[in-house]
Image (cartoon, rainbow, N blue to C red):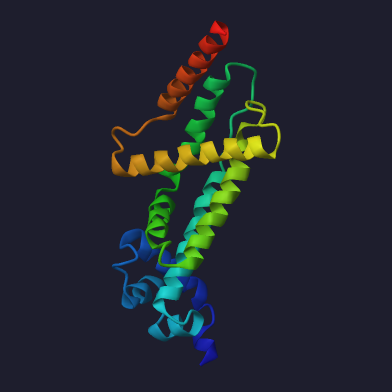
Amino acid sequence: MYSVFVGHREDLLEGAKRCLYERGYAHTTTRDIVAASGTNLASIGYHFGSKEALLTQALIEILSDWSDNIEGIELPEQTAGDPIDQFQEIWERVTGVFAVGAMEWNGSFEAFVQMKRSPEVLASIARKYEEGRLGLPKVFEGVVDADGERANRAFGGLLLSLLIGQAVQREVDPEHAPTARDLAEAIRLFATAAANAKRDD
């Protein structure tokens, strides 16, 4: 009996992820997962105990895939120049993952829906967010110097907020969602206001 289930675990996870992308958590049945994975009903119980446990693990893996897409971004070479222009160029690369990893982004929204019902999913999202807050500032090394842990975390929190907010807007209303250029223009407004206030002091 054991040999029948060997190798099914990864197949089940891939099948569950495919179902989450295509059907969503609420509309995925055990039979859907079996069909998508090419396995059998008994394998779900053997490896995960229940459909819910399998889908939870699949959601956690989707979040890891989402994070991997961000970490794999090819960044432009850092050159001297206007930091806001550099922000725009870098952010265009960062948000390019919305198109490249469209399935992972859609799957991550399923995780957001389920996080209040699953402590495991909630903990995984919190962990990935913390990694994002600490890791995203590295994308802008040489452009913005966030000196110290508090400044680095604050900058990372801002970048993560922009990233998630932009992702949600693109999902809801892609035609009107802000682009990297729009965000750069908005940042320039703050920079101009700050410069004017400093000059008036």
Q: Position of residue 143 (x, y in %)?
A: 63, 25
The picture quadrant where one finds residue 136 is top right
In the foreground, 61 or 116 = 116
- The quarter in which the C terminus is drawn is top right
112 lies above or below 10: above
The residue shown at (57%, 46%) is 132
The picture quadrant where one finds residue 173 is top left
The residue shown at (49%, 78%) is 8
12 to the left or right of 24: right
Q: How many marks?
A: 0
Q: Extreme bottom residue here?
A: 1
In the foreground, 103 or 133 = 133
Q: Extreme front residue here?
A: 201
Q: Extreme right residue here?
A: 148
The residue shown at (42%, 86%) is 42
Q: Is residue 196 visible?
A: yes
88 lies above or below 103: above
Q: Position of residue 185 (x, y in %)?
A: 44, 20
Q: Extreme top residue here?
A: 200
19 to the left or right of 132: left
Q: Position of residue 177 (x, y in %)?
A: 34, 34
Q: Is residue 96 visible?
A: no
